Amino acid sequence: VLDIYGFEIFEHNSLEQFCINYANEKLHQQFNENMFKAEQKEYTAEGVPWEEIKFKDNQACIDMIEKGYGGMCTLLDEECRVPKGNDKGFLARLDRAHARNPCFDHDRRDQDVFSINHFAGKVPYNIESWLDKNKDTLNTDVVKAMKTSGHNVVREFFMDPTAATDKRHTADDALKVPEKKVSARHSGRGRGSVRPSRDNKKSVVSKFKGYLGNLAKTLAASSRHYVRCIKPNDTKAALDFESVKVMTQLACNGVFESVALRKAGFSNRLEFAHFVNAYFSCMGNHSRDKEGIKSFLTSFLEGTETEEGGVLFAIGHTKVFVRDEAMNKLAAKQKEMWEQYVVVLQSYIRRATVAKEFARLKEMDAAAVVFQRHIRVYRAQQQLERYHQEDLLKKKRIRLLQAYVRRSMAVSELHVLVARDNAAITLQKHVRVSLAVADLELRRQAYLERLEQERLEAERLAREEAERIERERIEAEQRAKEEAERLERQKIEAEQRAKEEAERLEQERLEAEQKAKEEEERRLIEEAEAEAKRIQEEAEAEERREREEAEAAERKLREEEEKKVAREE
């Protein structure tokens, strides 16, 4: 980042202002090279028709300052080397070398001032102390100490900027170099003195010229971007613009030529692929190549003209060159196309959202049906298992009863064999057993019939439960449909309310703007009345002051007359 303050034009301009203005001249020349010549070179390389724009070239002023023979820097150094050279001798050299140069001006009536016509304007320079300032070099020992510093930045400050090779040694290497002792007999300067180095003999202007040359080379090898800063006033006050000062800075910075270049050229340059990616929605059926872009722009911009009546676009070898009017029209068309596509895209998104919600509800309904079926199966299995356990328990009881019956029969048979004479009792026992067996068989038949009736009743209840679940599912679907319709109605009502709210806000904004406008007019009227009142009060005060001065003069005149009469008496 290179920060340049700008030209300095004071009442008293000396060598410091000359160096600053010289640097600005050099940097402005690079700006012209980069801004104008590179721009026109791009149009030529792309094969775009172009009329060359003329701009102010400051090469003559730079040559007058820095050329090797007869340049101002060279003449100043020569005068510094002349025994008993002085500032007036330097000015005489300038007169002899540049008397006919349009960039130099010297009024012979003023022997201490000469002027240079810089690109920013005419700057007068006072030659007082120029030679002393140009010869203001550091002591040799100080320079040598700085060159052997262990700090890289300090050491680089004192390197020769115009050296052909980079002789940057480390501090240790510099300290290891043996110093040659110079005797007083050979030096002629006293014991222990050291001759000043060649670098230290360089003048201030020579060093500045070397630094500036290195800076110019660095900038030439860089990709440059310019930011022009305008100083609106000299008081640093806010919202205070001095039109003459601002216009002068714009003219000095080459802004007017830059604007003319932009207006005459094409401010928008897009590569073919970038143009197609940006405006494919507007191109329709045109092909996405160079010819397609050309036919599209020709048909789309038909009937549109610039303020100067020039062409709106040009097709180069690799880029499309478009003016601002055409870009604005393309942007408006692109916005219109995107608005149409956005509405269609929103409709598809809303449809997809509703379909996804419907599928989710449908999956939930199917999951509920499957869950209910599994619950019913689980309950039926539990009930069947319970019936099976009851049946096993009853069979076990029957078998136990049969065992007791067979045991009774065996006991009875034993009693018959043992006690044959107890036949009546045995017969009664057998009758009771027969009756018990018959009763048991009747109970078993009744139990089996009851089980069959319970099974039929369970199947009937299961069928009724399935029918009820189906009815509930149909009712849930109907409620979901009604809920979707209700949500759609609510969305439409919300959009209507939002539209009404926007209209209401717009109306409030217009009313607020109207009130603000009325308030501003009322404020301006009040300020005008206050200003008129202030002017009237100032006029009255001025009138009172003049009246008082007249009365005082009249009193003074009367006193003088009275004194005169008194003296005469």
Image: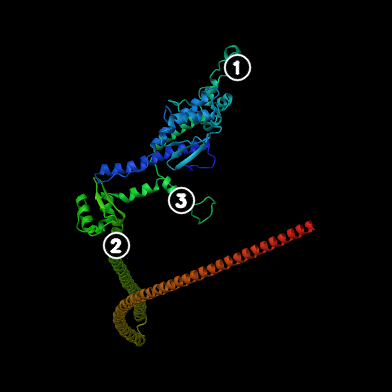
Identify which residue, 46 or 292, lies in the foreground.
Answer: 46
For residue 185, side relative to residue 451 (left or right): right
Residue marked by disc 3: 246
Disc 1 residue type (three-letter): Arg
Q: Position of residue 394 (x, y in %)?
A: 35, 77
Identify the mark at residue 301; answer none if there is no mark.
none
Disc 3 residue type (three-letter): Val
Residue marked by disc 2: 338
Identify which residue, 377 or 540, lies in the foreground.
Answer: 540
Disc 2 residue type (three-letter): Trp
For residue 151, side relative to residue 295 (left or right): right
Q: Residues within 10 Å of mark 3 (few under 14, many from 20)?
A: some
Residue marked by disc 1: 189
Residue for point 38% across, 75% down: 500
For residue 311, side relative to residue 252 (left or right): left
Q: Nearer the viewer, mark 3 or mark 1?
A: 3
Q: Residues within 10 Å of mark 2 (few under 14, many from 20)?
A: some
Residue 161 in view of the camera: no
Residue for point 77% across, 58% down: 563
Mark 2 → mark 1, Cα distance in angstroms: 87 Å
Identify which residue, 568 or 516, lies in the foreground.
Answer: 568
Mark 2 → mark 3, Cα distance in angstroms: 43 Å
Q: Position of residue 46 (x, y in %)?
A: 25, 44
**In the rendered structure, which disc, 2 or 3, sits on the residue that comes first in sequence?**
3
Residue 544 in view of the camera: yes
Q: Position of residue 488 (x, y in %)?
A: 33, 75
Q: Quadrant of residue 98?
A: top left
Q: Quadrant of the C terminus?
A: bottom right
Q: Quadrant of residue 51?
A: top left
**In the rendered structure, which disc, 3 or 1, sits on the residue that comes first in sequence?**
1
